[in-house]
Image (spheres, rainbow, N blue to C red):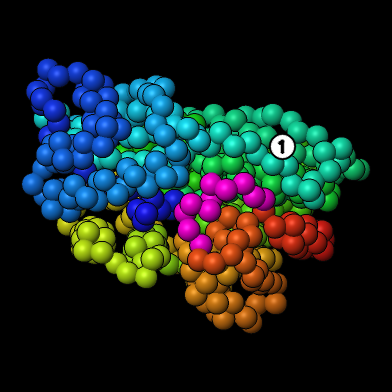
Amino acid sequence: MKYFLVSILITLLLMPSTLVYSNKIDIEDTAKGFISLLVQERFTEASKVFTEELTKALPENTLASIWKSLITTLGKFNSILDIKTTEIQVYKVVIVTCDFELGSLGIQITFDRESKIAGLYFLQPQFKATYRLPSYVDPDSYVEVELTIESHSYKLPATLTLPRIDKPYPIVVLVHGSGPHDRDETIGPNKPFKDIALGLASRGVAVLRYEKRTKQYGDKALIEGFTVNEETIEDAISAISLIYQRDDIDKDRIFLLGHSLGGMLAPRIVESTDRLKGIIILAGAINDLLELILKQARYLADLDGSISEEEKKQIEDIERQINLIRSGKIEKNEFILGAPCSYWLDLMNYKPLEILKSIDIPALILHGDRDFQVPIEDFYLWKEELKDKNQISFKLYKGLNHLFIFGEGKSTMEEYYKPGNVSQEVIEDIATWILSIQP
């Protein structure tokens, strides 16, 4: 089964008019009723609640395909675990947490002022499979300390992993990719940031990782005019400032490691602080996320060698929304493709390659050749455009996906939910590079 569950921005817009709509109807009961129809595979009834526009964009068979793909990935539906409601502008947002055989999944349903469903957003599944400690980690070689990063009005729980060696230590601050990630960048049973933290600490490098603002505060983090500055950059700077105050840290060897969106934003973070000695970019994109979303949609639709009419319509709808954003004809606070327009407008004007060309800082740029989320062409562009900068190193890994976990064949979303670990080669290369850079 194919469905657009794209981790860089997992967005599927549905606008139904539900079972018995009325302003007096309890929104949470309405949300439960909609989930019940999906569970019973009564897709004809569920699709009848869509508006005319969304019926064309997401017909009954597409809804059925999406749900059946979720069942294929997560197993049999068991029950609703939790339901929470918040308000954003004129919308009411209900998150229904569902328990499945293999894990849990939050289904976010957005209701408009007429109590019609205006959006359907599938959060990252949480699998019941347990995390597997990498073989390259020595549990006796480090200690972990819990901290809190205070960033503007937000408090973010964090973990500082310290090597059991003589102080002061070089340190790396980890910066997440797109989406509401926890400090480990958990996806299914995999925890790439935990692998990196424990792997580097086992080799003498301290690591700070923290809960992303959008994970810790959810919709409350989506303030007016929201951009990557509020999503990522402010908190990365606050994290750097926090560790800079510690006596056990080598203040002349503070590094930043950004994955995916975090890698893309690493040059912009460098511009905001003079405390970084170097940056590591893992699967960092060069072009704006709008272009990546479209590429991902096309890739996923064509995994079986063909693109159905329904998938073509979904791709066309994504293109339509992207063109609308680029046209400048929608308000900055209007939500589109899962984020306020202000978010996309900000990224449209951001050129990470040009910034990295203009600054003098050591950088290590790494990429997996099975990465479909940030295509290999971006890595080659980094390498070509920065080839004359002696302080920048590059490496491409055979068989690694976007999470830097090994696999074979075409990379898919489903493989992210199979247990694995960040490649030891990646850990060794990062540690060697960091330790080679002296104050």
Question: Residue 424: x percent and y percent?
Answer: 74, 57
Which quarter of the rendered picture does the C terminus lie within?
bottom right
Q: Nearer the viewer, residue 382 or 102?
A: 102
Q: Is residue 374 visible?
A: no
Identified at 34% across, 29% down, the residue is: 95
| Left or right, 112 with reference to 387 | left
Q: In the displayed structure, would residue 225 be above or below residue 366? A: above
Which secondary structure lies at badge 1?
A: strand
Residue lying farthest right? 166
Question: Residue 332: x percent and y percent?
Answer: 25, 48
Q: Which of 17 and 355 is in front in this view?
A: 17
At label 1, the amino acid type is Leu
Which quarter of the rendered picture does the N terminus lie within?
bottom left
Q: Nearer the viewer, residue 319 or 309?
A: 309
Q: Residue 396 is drawn in which quadrant?
A: bottom right
| Left or right, 278 with reference to 232 | right
Question: Residue 55: x percent and y percent?
Answer: 13, 48
| Residue at the spot of label 1 | 160
| Left or right, 22 with reference to 142 | left
Question: Residue 233: x percent and y percent?
Answer: 51, 48
Chief secondary structure of the magenta span? loop
Identified at 73% across, 42% down, the residue is: 133
- The answer to if 14 sits in the magenta stretch is no
Disc 1: CA contacts within 10 A as few (<14), some (14-19) or many (>=20): many
Q: Nearer the viewer, residue 79 or 15?
A: 79
Q: In the displayed structure, would residue 103 be above or below residue 430? A: above
Identified at 62% across, 46% down, the residue is: 419
Magenta stretch, residue numbers: 411-421
Identified at 59% across, 77% down, the residue is: 383
Q: In the displayed structure, would residue 295 be above or below residue 197? A: below
